Image: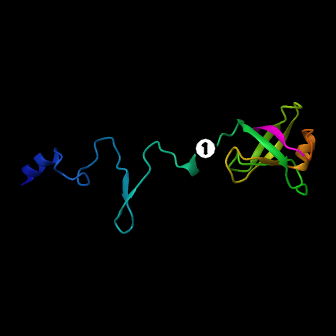
Amino acid sequence: MILVLLLVAGCDLVPAGLRPPPEGVQSADTRTANGDLRPQARPGQIEPAAAPEVSVGTLGRSVASLGNAAEPGLGLKTPLVRTTRPGRVHNPQTGQSVAVTLIPIDGPATAGSRLSLAAMQALGAPLTGLIEVDVFGA
């Protein structure tokens, strides 16, 4: 009986769930509390929520309008970031730059951004218009 099992273990007649994974390969399945199989992420696969965010460098170009003028400080609400963090915006038309706090908002990366009143003034931008800015992470 054992000899038959040993001979059959090397062929495809044994169900995949009963065969151990090849040497050096970890199983991609785990069992839940009630014994059901639960698939796990493949090695090297990054979950979207766990993907690292670029911390330094160009995040992109955005068209910005004046945000809430009652909010103090230098800030840019933009869909180009996922977490609040320091950054910088640059007005390519005037060459002026200002350090700001980058604040995430929902929307695609191509959606517009909202600059604080102080940031708009520091960039020399018209308060009633739209301004194209380059956004950098710090």
Write down the residue under mark 1.
Answer: 52
State the quadrant of the C terminus. Answer: top right
Q: Nearer the viewer, residue 129 or 60?
A: 129
Quarter in which the N terminus is drawn: bottom left
Number of numbered discs visible in the structure rendering = 1
Q: Residue at x 89, y 32 (%)?
A: 94
> Compared with residue 127, is residue 96 higher up or lower down, i.e. above or below?
above
Category of crowding for the residue at label 1, using alpha-carbon neighbours closer than 10 angstroms: few (below 14), some (14–19), many (at least 20): few
**Residue 88: horizontal and vertical position, in percent?**
80, 39
Q: Amino acid at mark 1?
A: Pro
Which range is magenta?
A: 129-138
Q: Is residue 17 left or right of residue 133?
A: left
Residue at position x 34%, y 43% in the image: 25
- Where does the image place residue 103, in percent across and percent down from the top left? 76, 50
Q: Secondary structure at mark 1?
A: loop
Q: Is 18 left, or right, of 96 in this rendering? A: left
